[in-house]
Amino acid sequence: MTRFLLVVPPLVGHINPLLGVADELARRGHRVAWAGYPEQIHRLAGADAVVFETRMPDVGLKRPAKLTGPAAFRFLWEEFFAPLAELMAPGVESAVEAFGPDVIVHDQHAVAGALVAERRGIPYVTSVSTSAELTDPLSSMPKVDAWLKGIFASLRESFGDPRKTTDPRYSPHGVIAFTGRALLGDAPLPSDRIELVGPAIAPRAAQSDFPYGDLDPRRRKVLVTLGTANLDAGTRFLTEAVGALHALRERVQGIVVDPGGVLDGMPGGVPESVLVREYVPQLDLLPHLDAVVCHAGHNTVCESLWHGVPLVVAPIRDDQPIVAGQVVDAGAGVRVRFNRVDAPRLAAAVESVLGTEGGHRAAAEAIGRSFRDAGGVLAAADHLDRIAARPADAQAAR
């Protein structure tokens, strides 16, 4: 029996891939605990999950408008991920004292888990929830790369091991990435320790009911979702999406996810041809869908492709433009401009991925087969088992 401590940031898309892995590890007889934001983890992992609380930011991340490229990357680390590490570190230390983990699994952007682990000599594994930083985006930005190394050195002085110089986003003990080559392409990976296991498709705690009886078997089904972290940006896009789906209503049934209720004030109201829900059980709904329109969030993209569902991607920020480019390069979808697309152009994009000329469905299905072959949850748990079984001297040599 091995004790695994999972260290995660307060971001749903970074927690979801580890939910099934945690369940599988527990099924194999291991002890699993979490370190992070308890309310959120319990909501996602269930009330019985063992959670050690760490401090979190008082307010959510507020990005300047139209911040892109290297400036956006620096902003995320300077204003969110680095301060988050400082906040989380004491709670991670307390979790280690109370739980006594044999292995720490940390999200790539919850580096407090990595730095506390290396200082204490505990093997740690990085969980990568997006393919964006597997393409080594800093290779063409040496100044940003040097700046980030300085951030890590400063964090190590505070609570890590100042003698270490490795990048805590890629553990020398092992990295589990919830994606695959069919989406990444042929670009070299930043570490030879990376295991590409594909998306972690596993049952999740039910968070909403869905009226499956309202689905029309005569029409194609298209879901529009912007994830859980884009409520501040979605009003115009969701309004245009409703218009696009209404225009296609004779052959398409649209389902729009509106967790912020931004469509409540839509002029004239939402037409009856479009089904609007505050939340949807996305994994359960995907087998019923013919296309997904989304922000190119990595989880939504990979879950859709795992089911062979083509995409219309409208990236907003962060890693989303990179992921959107990977979708288009793989032939599994088309890209539209989030801030510029209107209802007619969005309708045309939906029709293009629903048609046969572009081969988007075939490409999505091929990627889905490769994702399933990668092993997902079982492959991730197997990899963690192998790392936990390594002799202590072998771990220390890495």
Image (tube, rainbow, N blue to C red):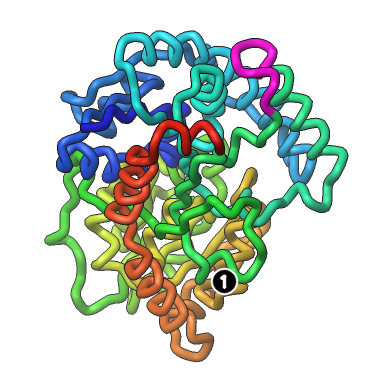
Q: Quadrant of the N terminus?
A: top left
Residue 207 is drawn in which quadrant? top left
Secondary structure under the numbered disc 1 in the rendered image: strand
Q: Nearer the viewer, residue 236 or 147?
A: 147
Residue at x 27%, y 45% (from the top left corner) = 20
Q: Quadrant of the C terminus?
A: top right
Q: Position of residue 46 (x, y in %)?
A: 20, 30
Residue type at mark 1 is Val
Horizontal side of 68 relative to 211 (left or right) equals right
Taking the magenta stretch, the answer to whether it contains residue 162 is yes
Q: Is residue 308 magenta?
A: no
Farthest residue to the left: give it. 213
Q: Residue furthest front?
A: 393
Q: Is residue 222 visible?
A: no
Left or right position of 352 against 2:
right
Residue 15: x and y in percent read: 39, 37
Magenta segment: 155-164
Q: Residue, x 20% and y 39% (percent of image)? A: 205
Looking at the image, residue 22 sits to the left or right of residue 122; the answer is left
Reading the image, the residue beneath label 1 is: 334
